[in-house]
Amino acid sequence: MIKRMMTMNRGDFKILDQKIYGRPLVYLDNAATTQKPQVVIDTLKAYYETINSNIHRGVHYLSQRATDEFEAAREAVRRFINARHAYEIVFTRGATDSMNLVAASFGRTFLHEGDEIVVSKMEHHANIVPWQFLCEDRGCVLKVLPFNEKGELCIEQLDQLITPKTKIVAVTQVSNSLGTVNPVKAIIEIAHKKGVPVLLDGAQAVSHCKVDVQALDCEFYCFSGHKMYAPMGIGVMYGKEEWLNKMKPYQGGGEMIKQVTFAKTTYNDLPFKFEAGTPSVGDAMGLKAAIEYMESIGIENIAAYEKELLDYAEKRLSSIEGLRIYGQAAQKAAIVSFNIDKIHPSDIGAIIDKLGVAVRTGHHCTQPIMDHFGIPGTVRASFAIYNDKKEIDDLYEAVYRAKNMLL
C-alpha cells in the first residue's frame, strides 16, 4: 500500500521525467535538497500572478490577501511541529539563517567571557561556525561531544561535559552525513536537569519523521523548507516564548519595531521582533503547500517507506567488494555515505553522474566527521518519497561500473 502511494506521487515531480546524458534521471541527492511537487510550484506561480504584495500594514486588497496567506503558512508550521503558539514560529531564509539567528541573538543576550557552548562532533558547519563567532567575540569556550565508530553520539559523556558555565547545548537531530538519528529527547533531559537550554538542528529530520517540539521540550528548533519539498529561501526558527521574549533582535529594520526615534527604538511583539525586512511571502506559501502535501501522504508512511529503501540500499551496496558505509547507527534516516578503497569519492561521483545518477560527494559541510574517519569525504546517496528500488539498483550498477573503471 505504501509503495503504491509513493509510486503514484512520483508523477507530481515533473523534473524526474527528464533524461541526463541520454539516461533517465536517478535523483539521490535529497539530503542536499528535495525536488518540488507540482502543487508547490503552482502555489508559487499563483502567488506571483494573483496576490503579489508586501504584507502587514497594507490596507489594500492584495496586501491583506498576502498577509492572510503568510500568517496561514505560519499556522501550518505551528501545527506541523506542534508548537504551542504561532508567534513562536519565526520565518527565516533557511536552517543556516535560523541557527545564526539563535547564536547571534542568544549570544548577545546571555553569553559572556568564559561561558561554554556544547555541540557534537557530527554537526553541520552551520551549527559550529556561528558558535565559533561567539567564542571569538565574547571569549566563550566551545566544547564537543564525540561519537563512536558506528556514528552514534557518546551521550554518556554529556553529563560531565555540561558544567555550571554551560549556557546552551546545540545538536543535530539527524546527521546529514551519517544518517544517524540522535537520541535528542535523552540529550534534552540531561541538559534540562542542569538548567541548560537546547537547540536542535532539524534540517534533516522534518522530512523523515514526525516532529513534536512540545514533546521534545527543546528551546529552539531550526529547519529549512527546501529539504522538505518546499522552495529554497524559506526556513523556520522555532523558539519557546519565554526565551524569545528575553532575546535581543537579530537584525534591525522594518517590521521588527514598534516605535523608532533617534533617542530610542522599541521592538515589536513576537514573532515580528525577529523578522526584519520584507519576507519571502510566496516561499512561505510554498512551505505551507509542501507541509500539506506531506501530511496528505502521512509522515509515518513516509518514514516506513524510506526505511525500506535504506535497508535495501545498504544491503545492495555492501555486496560491492571494498565498499565501506560510514554510519552504522542503530537508528538511521534514509542516507547512505560510502567510499570504495583506493578511489576518491569525487571520481566515483563524476562517473556515475554520466550514467544519470545524481549523488553528492565531498565533506558535506561536516569536516570534523571526515577528519574523525581520516577521509577527504564520501559519496552520499539520500532518498525521498519519489525514489524506488529500481533506482537503487541503478545506483548499484553505476557504482559497480565506476569501480571497475577506476581500479
Image (cartoon, rainbow, N blue to C red):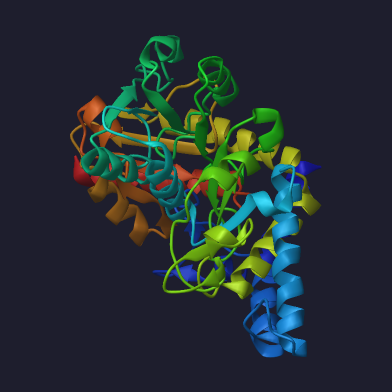
Residue 294 appears in the rendering: no
396 sits to left or right of 73: left
Above or below for 228 versus 277: above
Residue 247: image location, x then y, percent: 50, 46
**Horizontally, is 72 left or right of 199 in the view?**
right
Above or below 186: residue 395 = below
Q: Position of residue 11 (x, y in %)?
A: 69, 65
Q: Residue at x 48, y 70 (%)?
A: 19
Dividing the picture into quadrants, the one containing residue 168 is top left
Question: In terms of depth relative to the viewer, which is nearer, 173 or 373?
Answer: 173
| Residue at x 72%, y 65% (from the top left corner) | 71
366 or 316, nearer to the observer: 366
All told, the count of numbered labels is 0
**Rendered location of residue 66, percent (x, y):** 71, 78
- Quadrant of the frame with the N terminus: top right
Can you give x and y, in whole percent of width and height, for residue 193 in the image? 55, 14
Residue at image location 63% in from the left, 34% down from the top: 308
Picture quarter with the C terminus: top left
Residue 262 seen in the figure: yes
